[in-house]
Image (tube, rainbow, N blue to C red):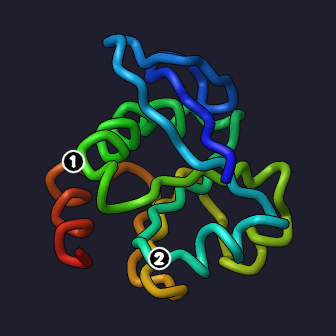
Amino acid sequence: MERIPIETNMPPHRASNEKADGNDCEFISVDDDSVEKIVLESTTPVVVMFWSPRSPSCRLAAPMINKLAEEFKDRILVAKLNIDLNPQTTLQYHIISVPTLAIFKNGHEVDRTVGGVVWSALKGKIEAIL
């Protein structure tokens, strides 16, 4: 399982070893070939951010996703899937807008948020599935 660190002040398609505040924060990078094994077969709940490097909204969502990964690091996995590079999974899950956050538990999508989301609402959704 490949983990890619990401910095909050960089576009989601770039990687860095540290966030802007100096703390490590890692995402799991998934693609058409690995989504089944990493997301669907996971015994841990997984939040997948479907994103595109062309989307300003995805860059705006990055700090919240970093915070999510950090706060729940021992209880969930946080993954990113670039829709531009992974058309099969994008079509399979009917992703038509980014960012889309899909929450998977026991191999099934249990929640989805499209576009912006408030931190308290996202945190509540995660706590509800744990």
Judging from the image, what secondary structure is the residue with disc 1 in?
helix
On screen, residue 122 versus residue 39, left or right, reads left
Q: Which residue is mark 2?
A: 104
The CA distance from mark 1 to mark 2 is 18 Å
- Quarter of the image with the C terminus is bottom left
Q: Quadrant of residue 24?
A: top left
Q: How many marks?
A: 2
Residue at the image position 45 percent from the left and 54 percent from the top: 115
Residue at the image position 67 percent from the left and 54 percent from the top: 1
On screen, residue 80 versus residue 36, left or right, reads left
Q: Is residue 110 above or below residue 32?
A: below
Q: Is residue 52 above or below residue 115?
A: above
Judging from the image, what secondary structure is the residue with disc 2 in?
strand
Q: Could you say which is closer to the camera, residue 55 or residue 120?
A: 120
Q: Residues within 10 Å of mark 2 (few under 14, many from 20)?
A: many
Q: Position of residue 101 (x, y in %)?
A: 47, 61
Q: Quadrant of residue 122?
A: bottom left
Disc nearer the start of the sequence (1/2): 2
Q: Could you say which is closer to the camera, residue 9 or residue 77?
A: 77
* Residue 119's disc number: 1
Q: Is residue 54 above or below residue 98?
A: above
